[in-house]
Image: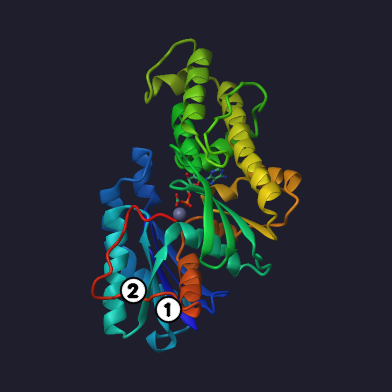
């Protein structure tokens, strides 16, 4: 069974063709990231407008790369949420129209759940029971799956998402957006023990909180700069030396990664999973990968780096499992986006 996936929840316009939920035939992604860089974050109106411009060429590209026409597609899976309303609307309306005109079954997919399914496209398949950590710019969820569609959310963030924390700390330090890669790069030159940063306490031991850490970074940066410059302001990063920035970046990265790995380890002990999946943009972080290898006893499956960030292959993969497990189809005449869709 071949599923065409369509993803437009944030700033990536993506389409992909996946066979039997496991074989990736094609994946096309167009990102409007460059247009958002001057603003230091995604601007919803700009993202929605770029989706409209590129969605049809991106779908055509995915079909062409998969060497198939519409005859060879059995179903369409589209991200219903969570995400930006204007962005989701473009994907959902395109998928609805194509489902009607090309006479295909339509499946509505949860974007956060789909991040985990990117791991099923790997050679080494994850096994149930499965513990999943989904960490990106928009989400931070720790989830225990007993099987497909049989899961329990153990914890989530009370404030900022993990990737968002990297992005905000980068902004404090005047490092380029997206913050994850630029923090990681600067951290290489810094001493992770140089700045003492607090670990958040949450009522539920599996929940996360990153906003206190971000504030502590701001205070440390102000102390090192010798003046409590406002944030956001360019004055603060200008007053910091390269090594001060590197030390703060390294200390922040260590603390954030420690929190993620510690949560995984606690859940591993309690739930005894057969596999662990770490997915989402932050899964690209090298320190996180090293920490997971060192402290976790269970084998970790990472989606391919290209499938850690937003893509449509994961949407098509989950769409396949929805179809094969006889989950309800979506009505192409009435499906609406759901920006606040929960797992
Ligand atoms: O999954 P993704 O592409 O988009 C969302 O759905 O949010 O994740 C993007 C996020 C950004 O916040 C970015 O700073 C973070 O992932 N990220 C990283 C790294 N690469 C990307 N965070 C930490 N370390 C990295 N190497
Ligand atoms: Zn995502």
Residue 118's mark? none
Residue at label 2? 330
In this rendering, the answer to whether 326 lies above or below 132 is below
Return the residue nearer the eye: 253 or 127. Answer: 127
Q: How far apart are marks 2 and 1 (CA)?
A: 22 Å
Q: Compare residues 209 and 31 and report the one nearer the observer.
A: 209
Seen from the viewer's position, the closer of residues 149 and 277 is 149
Q: Residue furthest left?
A: 333
Q: Where is residue 135 in the image (x, y as percent from the top left)?
A: 52, 48
State the residue position of label 1. 63
Residue 248 placement, left or right of 333: right
- Across and down, in percent, residue 182 comes to 53, 38
Which percent across, then down, holds residue 198? Answer: 57, 25
Q: Does the residue labelled 2 lie within 8 Å of ligand 2?
A: no
- Quadrant (top left/top right/bottom left/bottom right) for the C terminus: bottom left
Q: Quadrant of residue 28?
A: bottom left
Q: Which quadrant of the figure shows ligand 2?
A: bottom left
Question: Position of 120 compared to 52: left or right?
Answer: right
Residue sticking out furthest to the top = 226
Q: Residue furthest bottom?
A: 71
Q: In this view, does 202 lie to the left or right of 268?
A: left
The quarter of the picture where residue 332 lies is bottom left
Q: Which residue sits at x=50%, y=34%?
A: 210
Q: Quadrant of residue 244?
A: top right
Few, some or many residues within 10 Å of mark 2 (<14, 14–19, 20+): some
Q: Indicate whether 306 appears above or below 21.
A: above
């Amino acid at each position: 069974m071949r599923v065409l996936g369509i993803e437009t929840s944030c700033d990536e316009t993506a389409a992909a063709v996946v066979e039997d939920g496991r074989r990736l035939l094609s994946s096309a992604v167009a990102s409007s990231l460059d247009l958002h860089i001057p603003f230091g974050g995604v601007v919803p109106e700009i993202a929605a407008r770029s989706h409209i411009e590129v969605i049809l060429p991106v779908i055509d590209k995915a079909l062409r790369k998969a060497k198939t026409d519409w005859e060879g597609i059995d179903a369409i899976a589209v991200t219903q949420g969570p995400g930006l309303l204007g962005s989701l609307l473009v994907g959902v309306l395109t998928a609805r129209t194509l489902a009607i005109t090309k006479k295909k079954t339509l499946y509505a997919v949860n974007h956060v759940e789909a991040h985990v399914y990117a791991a099923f496209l790997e050679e080494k398949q994850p096994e149930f029971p499965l513990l999943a950590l989904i960490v990106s710019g928009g989400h931070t969820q720790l989830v225990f799956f007993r099987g497909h569609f049989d899961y329990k959310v153990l914890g989530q963030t009370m404030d900022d998402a993990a990737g968002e924390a990297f992005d905000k700390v980068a902004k404090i330090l005047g490092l380029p957006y997206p913050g994850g890669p630029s923090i990681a790069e600067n951290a290489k030159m810094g001493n992770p023990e140089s700045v003492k940063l607090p670990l958040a306490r949450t009522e539920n031991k599996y929940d996360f909180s990153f906003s206190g850490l971000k504030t502590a970074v701001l205070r440390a940066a102000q102390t090192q700069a010798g003046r409590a410059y406002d944030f956001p302001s360019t004055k603060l990063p200008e007053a910091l030396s390269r090594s001060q920035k590197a030390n703060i970046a390294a200390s922040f990265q260590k603390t954030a990664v420690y929190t993620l790995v510690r949560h995984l380890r606690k859940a591993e002990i309690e739930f005894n999973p057969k596999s662990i999946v770490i997915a989402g943009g932050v899964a690209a972080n090298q320190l996180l990968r090293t920490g997971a290898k060192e402290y976790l006893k269970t084998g970790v499956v990472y989606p391919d780096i290209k499938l850690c960030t937003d893509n449509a292959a994961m949407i098509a993969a989950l769409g396949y499992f929805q179809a094969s497990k006889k989950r309800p189809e979506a009505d192409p005449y009435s499906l609406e986006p759901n920006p606040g869709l929960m797992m």
